[in-house]
Image: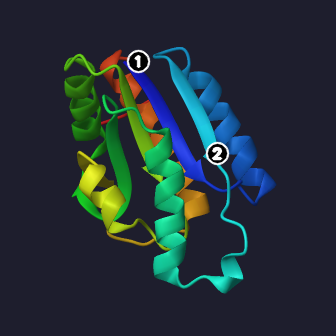
Amino acid sequence: MKIALWMIGKTAERYLEEGMSVYEKRLRHYAPFEVTVLPDIKQVKNLSIAQLKEAESVVVLDRLDKRDVLVLLDEKGKTFGSVAFAKWMEGQMNQSVQRMVILIGGAYGFSEDVYRRAQFRISLSEMTFSHQLVRLVFLEQLYRAMTILKGEPYHHE
């Protein structure tokens, strides 16, 4: 299974980009993995939050293949411990899914069209994180999951 992490807009902070780069490289050892930065919406100051989410949804939905499994990182999604998340990922990898697209939305979340298209919603925590910081945190958790599945010593119980 190919894993694709999609993010709306560029990462603003250099320290986040550097950390993300470390985990992106590590993840490629375990599975075909790619990161795609979807373009920011232009003229955002002229849009309401609903219009912005709708414009972002067009960018996302137009790029998805009908066979893609879409996973949203969403504060109202299912929470996992690291081991449980690893087991969930293993189950997805065993489902003959060609590509799993994990989407980190913009600052205001997702439109209803994106929610309807998604097969899964995952929350990293009951706490709220910036959509920029979530990028690094999720990459680390995805890497942790892969090391758990391989029985490597990165994760300690």
Q: Position of residue 92 (x, y in %)?
A: 24, 27
Q: Is residue 75 above or below residue 85?
A: below
Q: Position of residue 48 (x, y in %)?
A: 54, 85
Q: How is the image coloured?
A: rainbow
Q: Quadrant of residue 142?
A: top left
Q: Is residue 31 left or right of residue 91?
A: right
Q: Residues within 10 Å of mark 2 (few under 14, many from 20)?
A: few
Q: According to the image, label 2 marks what residue?
A: 37
Q: Residues within 10 Å of mark 1 (few under 14, many from 20)?
A: few
Q: Position of residue 98 (x, y in %)?
A: 34, 19
Q: Position of residue 85 (x, y in %)?
A: 27, 39
Disc 1 vs disc 2: which is toward the camera?
A: 2
- Nearest the eye: 49 or 140: 49
Identity of the residue furthest to the right in this view: 14
Q: Disc 1 residue type?
A: Glu
Residue shown at 66% from the left, 56% from the top: 9
Quadrant including the N terminus? top left
Q: Disc 2 residue type?
A: Val
Q: Is residue 120 left or right of residue 99?
A: left
